[in-house]
Image (tube, grey):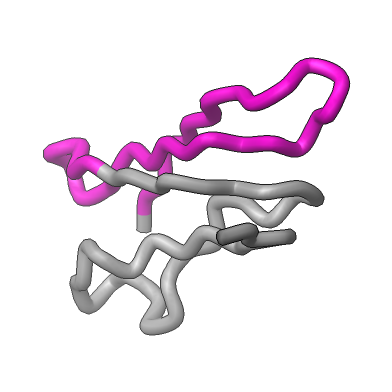
Amino acid sequence: MRYIGLTLLLCIFVAAAWPPDGVPVGGQAGDQLRPAAADDGAGGAWVVWRDDRSAATGPDIYARHVDK
């Protein structure tokens, strides 16, 4: 399967303060695959994914911290 321009949304940590449609954490050109998220213990989360945005360097791993 190929996902082009996939926008990763953090929707798994449901709380009243989080937007109902999630929080965008990606969305650059290229493929963003295999997202994973972990609770940070303070109401936020760490999100990581494989990112194929650069054909010159090949796939990379990206991470982003998100909070309310």
The x, y position of residue 15, in whole percent, is 19, 72
Which stretch is magenta?
38-67
Find the residue positioned furthest to the right. Answer: 56
From this viewpoint, which residue is outermost toward the front?
1
Looking at the image, which residue sits at the far bottom? 20
Residue 37 occupies quadrant: top left
**Direction top: furthest residue:** 57
Q: Who is closer to the viewer here, 68 or 45?
A: 45
Instruction: Count how many numbered circles sit on residues in the image.
Output: 0
Q: Left or right: where does residue 61 sit relative to residue 59?
A: left
The residue shown at (20%, 37%) is 40
Residue 46 included in the magenta stretch of the image: yes
The location of residue 12, given as percent across then percent down, is: 25, 65
Residue drawn at (54%, 29%) of the image: 62
| Looking at the image, residue 51 lies above or below residue 68 | above
Q: Position of residue 43 (x, y in %)?
A: 20, 50
What residue sits 52% from the left and 47% below the top? 33
Q: Is residue 55 left or right of residue 4?
A: right
Residue 50 percent location from the top left of the image: 52, 35
Q: Nearer the viewer, residue 23 or 3?
A: 3
Res 68 quadrant in image: bottom left
As drawn, is 34 to the left or to the right of 33? left
Quarter of the image with the N terminus is bottom right
Is 31 situated above or below 12? above
Residue 7: in magenta span: no
